[in-house]
Amino acid sequence: MCSEKKYVYSFEEGSLELKSLLGGKGANLGEMTSLGLPVPPGMTVTTEACNLYYESGEQLPEFSREEIRSYLTELEEKMDKSFGDDNNPLLLSVRSGAVISMPGMMDTILNLGLNDQSVKGLAKETGDEKFAYDCYRRFIQMFGEVVLDVEAYKFSRKLDSLKEEVGAETDIDLTVDHLKELIDKFKLIVKEEAEVDFPQDPMEQLITAVEAVFGSWNNKRAIVYRDAHDIDHELGTAVNIQSMVFGNMGQDSGTGVVFTRNPSTGENKLYGEYLLNAQGEDIVAGIRTPEDIQTFKDSLPEVYEQLVEVTETLEKHYKDMQDIEFTVEKGKLYLLQTRTGKRTAKSAIKIAADMAEEGLIDQDQALLRVEPEHIEKVLHRQIDPEAETEVIAKGLPASPGAAAGTVVFSADEAEKIAENGEKVVLVSLETTPEDIHGVLAAEGVLTTRGGMTSHAAVVARGMGKPCVCGCDEIKIDFEAGEFTVGGQTVKEGERITINGGTGEVILGKVKMTEAKLSQECKDILQWADDRRDLQVRTNADNGTDASKAFEFGAEGIGLCRTEHMFMAADRVPIVQRLILSESDQEKRDALTELEPIQCQDFEEIFAEMEGRAVTVRLLDPPLHEFLPNLPELIEEVTELRVKGEKEKLKEKENLLRKVKNMDESNPMLGFRGCRLGVIIPEIYEMQARALFKAAIKLATEEDTKTELEIMIPLVSELAEFEILRERIEEIADQLLTEANLELDYKVGTMIELPRACMTADQIAQKADFFSFGTNDLTQTTFGFSRDDAEGKFLHEYLEREVIEDNPFITLDAAGVGKLVNLAAKSGRQANPDLKVGICGEHGGEPRSIALCQEYGLDYVSCSPYRVPVARLAAAQAKIKKS
Ligand code: PEP
Ligand code: MG
């Protein structure tokens, strides 16, 4: 087999446009090379080669090996070094680089090209024998683990026992002879475990390393990560082969990771860490705790200046915050990688707003940079400043927000306990990509080692989970299942709280508060408001929710569910009397008692909304929901029968008879919504009177005219709507005439049944507005019971990919959405003044909001905390459409 296709690109040939072929890292290395920045030369083997590797039975075909060899010759010429040479050897790093960054999930090999000969060359060239042999032992270890599948602990155990034997405290204390001895021992491990000699041919090392990195695309942690982040498993990774530079060549060498802005807070200041005399892996693995980059100017001032300059160049070029890896070899700066920096929600919002203010990007770009979830996250909990806290330790504030839970010491345990619905905090020395499932399951993560760019910090930030890192005062005793700090012992299963914003570790579960919106967030939301077409309303049933939503920017109420007003403890007895009434008089009495209470509820809400539109839905659920539970009642009656309490028994038997009468096998499709209104008109009449009385009171006493919209639920037939509209109008006429007041009001309907969608043109002739109740519409279109489907089979459907998304969360564009679109269009054709909105749960979900924009709806309505999310999502939908 041979190929015309190109599978390898030198960095000079690479650029951002080729990202899907070269992966993020490869494309950026190409881009940086073109910008003239100091990047060690190399090549990228493409994502297509990765797929080829899998298609060819997990090996590279000969023609692509040949391509790598020929690029290698070029690289040798460029570097004036030769591969495997015992004089001036070329050494390489081999790293994965997917199109969408998957930090730490795949494998890396450093110092490739070292063998028994070239190690001597490296020693000669650097004049540092210890350094050369240290590189060689690291290489055997990494190659052994990644390529030859030798378990890591076999090497580390050998290293530890040698250190103990010779009395070396750290790796640095080992002598050349110790290292040579270790190399022999490591080779022996390879021979025993992998049953091969450690390969001395550098070309063989390279090809097998590339293959192993391609193979790591499908390791368990990478698969879990892709599942968690919705990344396509078919994409494949690219592999970058790059000439090595060394950060461990003395005190004028080092390595570090910097972000052009603070990834936690968004502050516009270089942020990051470095270690002198170290290789990149030392930082990422969190084994030595690195120094703050701000002190780098004291260690290597000239290099620091140059670093600041290149980071500025990169941020200006990419117009986004960059996460940059660098190495300094004997005073010379090299950039190993740049990528768009992962950031917390708070930081994403600040950076987007600041960059727009600085003119680096425009407002539309800023709006697209912030994800709706970011807005959701900044609305998240913090520790109540008033709360009494017992701080037992302090680590690095790695990812903001507060989390409380029971202490667990392993990722597996975290996953197991969280599955039972318990909240856990994962406490660990450090996390590795292997622990990803535990981080996912935990509320927050606390590590005793590692810095702000360690694995735990990066992953937790990406997930928006609170994280405290490098809390080295805490000593974990895994065997005893406890940790100690300052004389205190915390056992597995006890509760702690962590504050990822301050780094504090607190004993017990503490009180938390809801978050406030920052000024930058308010700016972003203001720009979103300027941009969007869709109005954003809220679903609120009381003054408190209405006030919260108003504060979050709701432009009105799109759904006030009045049944919630019937369910308060003081009202239930009256409602029960109403339902169980045996005479008209009894019914009238109960309604007379309820009316002023309802009226007061409405007054409160109208006052909060200060004249904005308020859509009030008349009673929807079946009446038996307000009555005692049938099985419990049967039990009570049986007990009374046994006890022979005649008087009470008679009363309960009477109640039981009525409850049984009202019992339905399928209440969701039963006597509810407008059907109640048609058959027992007195309830809706009472509600209409309460509504108009409240609106009249506010208009006359407070001079606030509410835009009242009365909504009739569950209409499927025009006649239902007509009957009820007529009654409402009669009541309105009477009350407004008595009050001598003119008040515009609307009467509309929920569209939540397929038949209503199909007859929307008829209903629209009589209705002033439609509000899509997509919860019921999803239920009735799919025939999935909204009470049962999610608990019974829907998660299996999702797992087995029978359906792609949960239709109760994301509007089903192909079915339910199509009905919404059709009904909105035919309704508007019949009545051009028809106002159309959505008030099902989908009204606060970004992808569904984009569909609402596509269908040209007038507004979305959602719960108060989702209002800011919806404001941004609506603007994004508009920008993307145009
Ligand atoms: C709906 O069905 O989408 C709706 C908003 O009404 P409810 O959830 O109260 O049935
Ligand atoms: Mg409904």
Image: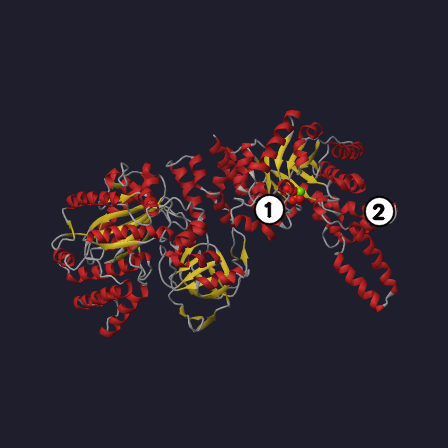
Horizontally, residue 103 falls left or right of residue 841, namely left
Q: Label 2: state its secondary structure.
A: helix
Q: Quadrant of ligand 1?
A: top right
Q: Is residue 757 above or below residue 464?
A: above
| Residue 287 picture location, percent across and down | 32, 62
| Residue ID at (75%, 49%) | 664
First in sequence: mark 1 vs mark 2 = 1
**For residue 877, which numbered disc appears in the image?**
none
Residues at marks 1 and 2, CA–CA distance in whole angstroms:
36 Å
Amino acid type at circle 1 is Lys
Find residue 435 and report its image quarter.
Answer: bottom left
Image check: 592 left or right of 510?
A: right
Quick check: is the Cβ at mark 1 less than 8 Å away from ligand 1?
A: no
Rendered location of residue 354, percent (x, y): 41, 41
Which residue in the structure is indicated by mark 2? 587
Q: What element does badge 1 sit on?
A: helix
The answer to whether residue 612 shows anywhere in this view is no
Q: Where is residue 12 in the image (x, y as percent from the top left)?
A: 24, 39
> Callout 2 environment at 10 Å: few (<14), some (14 to 19), or many (20+)?
some
- Disc number for residue 548: 1
Q: Where is residue 610 in the image (x, y as percent from the top left)?
A: 64, 39
Q: Quadrant of the N terminus?
A: top left
User: In which image quadrant can residue 501 be found?
Assistant: bottom left
Q: Is residue 50 visible?
A: yes
Circle 2: residue type:
Lys
Q: Which of 645 and 609 is in front in this view?
A: 645
* Residue located 27% across and 53% down the image: 209
In the depicted structure, whether residue 772 falls above or below residue 255: above
Q: Does 771 appear above or below 311?
A: above
- Seen from the viewer's position, the closer of residues 98 and 729 is 98
